[in-house]
Image: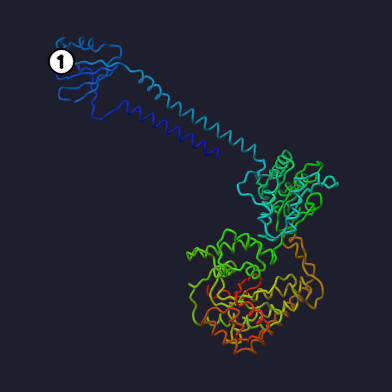
Amino acid sequence: MPENRGRGGIIYLLIIALVIAGIFFIVNPTSSSVKTVPLSTVVQQVKDGVVGSMKVTKNKLDITLADSSKEVAYKDTNENVYDMLEKAGVPKEKLTNLGIEVLPTESSDFWLNILISAVPFLLIIGFFVFMMRSAQNSNNQAMSFGKSKARLAEGEKQKTTFKDVAGAKEAKQELFEIVDFLKNPLKYTALGAKIPKGVLLVGPPGCGKTLLARAVAGEANVPFFNISGSEFVEMFVGVGASRVRDLFKKAKRNAPCIIFIDEIDAVGRHRGAGMGGGHDEREQTLNQILTEMDGFEQDTNVIVISATNRPDILDPALLRPGRFDRRVTVDAPDIKEREEILNIYAKNKPLDTSVDISRIAKTTPGFTGADLENLMNEGAILAARKNAKVITREEIEQAVEKVTMGPERKSRILSKEEKKIIAHHEVGHAIVAHLSSNCDPVHKISVISRGMALGVTWFMPEEDKHLYSKNKFQDEIASMLGGYSAEQIIFGDVTTGASNDLERATGIARKMVTEYGMSDLGPITYGEHDREIFLGRDFGHMKNYSEEIASKIDSEVRKFVEKGHETAKKVLNENVELLKKIAKDLMEKETLNSEDFLAYFGKSEKHAEKIEGDKKAKPIAHPTLKISNIKGKKHA
């Protein structure tokens, strides 16, 4: 901003100079057609009688000849024109007949000349002023380099309150007590309670941590400073600590107040975890934060609220009581909370009567608040694309699929053979999952390309799940390998389309062995999974198991994957004709929903009763927890 103002000053000076120069040329016009002649020529012309008239202005002679042509001559300023001509020998009768007009000298010419003469000096002075201001601004920037960049939230037109935050009841309760403590301190101090020093909001991205902080800013009648953790650290050592000191100094002047530090893991990482030593800039900044939050100074009435989705990498000294007294988990919403969130984001959107918010909430497990907001927004955009006045159930269904897998890519043209492989691959997933007792119901099968997937099989969980059993994982692996097995059985060959399925199946099997204790190796975890993100520790970190155990782990992983493969092949071999029939219909229709798929098994199947009850309201796909798809590596 100061640099822009300096440039603007120079531009203004140049404009003024151009205006003055223009005025000068208007007042004193010069024309290339006017000839300048010496005085001797003028005297001779007067003697010859060819001069019609003459105007005298100071030392300038504007001469008009008899043929109307013009000339200019200059004389001595103090010499009279009549005396000059008489001395030159011009007869008096010639002077008498000569029309000489002496013009008065205007005072404006004097000031104009002064002003024009001053223009260069004004430009020089303006240049020096600009240089001095630039130096002063640079000095101010250098002096304010260690100042905090925290913004004070006050006077916002649209304040966010706790009413705008759906779900997260426990988190809202914890933060409401903080706000209430600031509004009614006597209510708590009378019981000997002290104001909490800090609250740490922990949860996955998009679950509403920053939204909760904005709600606190809207509810609290105290100053609210907000800053990101990355804004503390600069390239110069000591700047982060200086900014922390300045931030808390401002906060103490405005106490009681609240400081919100978003993404505190940017400066709150575990000390000694990186490659830097004790002089590391982040460690210096963290040390200053620790001192300011709970050092020698007490009763500062400054509350620190921080948010992070990586609590495992924070320094233990930052997490102890006295610094962050409360650790609030903001997790993904459950079905009831999803319904409340959807109602908030649907307030300003005209929904058709066919849209059932509770149904959307039921069929979107795993969606965060940000996902649900994006879902409703995409639905509105799809409706606007059709020039519709309301958002219907169809747009919401398409929005769910678009948010999860990307838009349909109908422009991707597949050959008949490729489409046949994709159809059998996807139906293989669906049949194995349907005939396994622990897999989620099949919701939709499609051979329409979406994103990087050439085909997709959706599984819709019947309810939110938090615990997974060994049998469920084994059925999941078998379902993932259903497409791979279908290709083997029908075509006697396999394609690259199963690469994502194999990767996910292997990942689940390895976690069953190394993390969940579900293998023959016993109830032991292998590997320090909570420390793998630290590059510095990895250099000096050894695996907590031997090479012999590593070989056994690989063997157990292979055992789980091969068992799933054998199960998938057995199920598909027993239903190979059904596999071909469903794949043939899928190639023609391109998409089969749950009702179409279950019709091949009859209404007596385990999911028929559920589908029968949902005929009036078509379920909405949600492939967040589990999507089996065939990737397009082969066709890239």
Residue 340 to residue 114: above or below: below
Q: Quadrant of residue 422?
A: bottom right
| Percent x, y of residue 488 | 61, 85
Of 276 and 391, nearer the camera is 391
Q: Quick one: which residue is furthest to the right in this view? A: 192
Instruction: Give how far across and how far down residue 534 sits, in percent.
Output: 72, 59
Is there any visible trace of residue 375 in the rendered image? yes
User: Residue visible at 63% across and 44% down?
Assistant: 155
- Mark 1 element type: helix
Residue located at (23% from left, 22% from top): 37
Q: Identify the image quadrant of the N terminus.
A: top right
Circle 1: residue type: Lys
Residue 410 lies, with reference to residue 193, above or below; the image says below
Q: Where is residue 523, by image quadrant?
A: bottom right
Residue at mark 1: 47
- Whether residue 238 is visible: no
